[in-house]
Image (cartoon, rainbow, N blue to C red):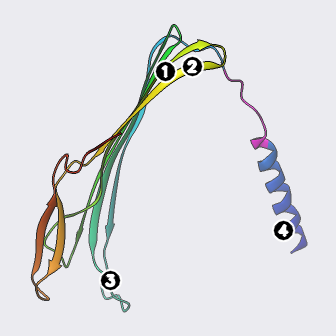
Amino acid sequence: MKKKGVLLMICMLLAIGFQGQEKEVDSIKVEGWKKSGLTSLIVNQTAFSNWISGGENSIAATLSVDYNINYYKNGWSWDTKIIGSFGINKNSDSKYFKKIDDRIEINSLIGKKFIEKFSFSSFLNFKTQFAKGFKYTNASEEIEIREETTRFLSPAYLQ
């Protein structure tokens, strides 16, 4: 038991020691456009068969995008972040696909550097959704009713 504890401590200390290495960062900004981003698709399925505790079979999927578009030239900088995600879920006891994630967000920051430690900037934020939203109610054990509550760009927020 003591050997396992000592071995575990050594492994933890080595892992912490390797985290302490600093990377060199280039502090000179490259002029022009710089773009980067990620796209992901996550699919999940759950199935229960003869499960004593019960449960609902379901399938779900979420598509997400997260992109950065940045510009720098002559002291001007413009940073834009675009985030979008849409996810749906279908349970075995429901006849409808239901949203589990629905988001469009754009953040934009523009600024001008005047002297070494002084600059002006302005920020813009836009948020909305892709698809219609519904309120679900059960009229009875077998009948599910949905009522539309929102649509594309409803609501939309601009700050």
Q: Is residue 135 above or below residue 156?
A: below
Q: In this view, does 58 lie above or below 101?
A: below
Could you tell which of marks 2 and 1 lies nearer the N-terminus?
1
Could you tell which of marks 3 and 4 lies nearer the N-terminus?
4
Could you tell which of marks 2 and 4 lies nearer the N-terminus?
4
Tell me which segment is drawn in magenta.
Answer: 18-25
Could you tell which of marks 4 and 1 lies nearer the N-terminus?
4
Q: Does the magenta stretch include residue 39?
A: no
Q: What residue do we see at 79% from left, 48% from top?
A: 16
Q: Does the magenta stretch include residue 22?
A: yes
Q: What residue do we see at 86% from left, 75% from top?
A: 1
Q: What residue type is labelled 3?
A: Gly
- Mark 3 = which residue? 55
In front of the other: label 3 or label 1?
Answer: 1
Viewer-nearest residue: 24 or 138: 138
For the residues labelled 3 and 1, say whether their Cβ atoms are less than 8 Å apart: no
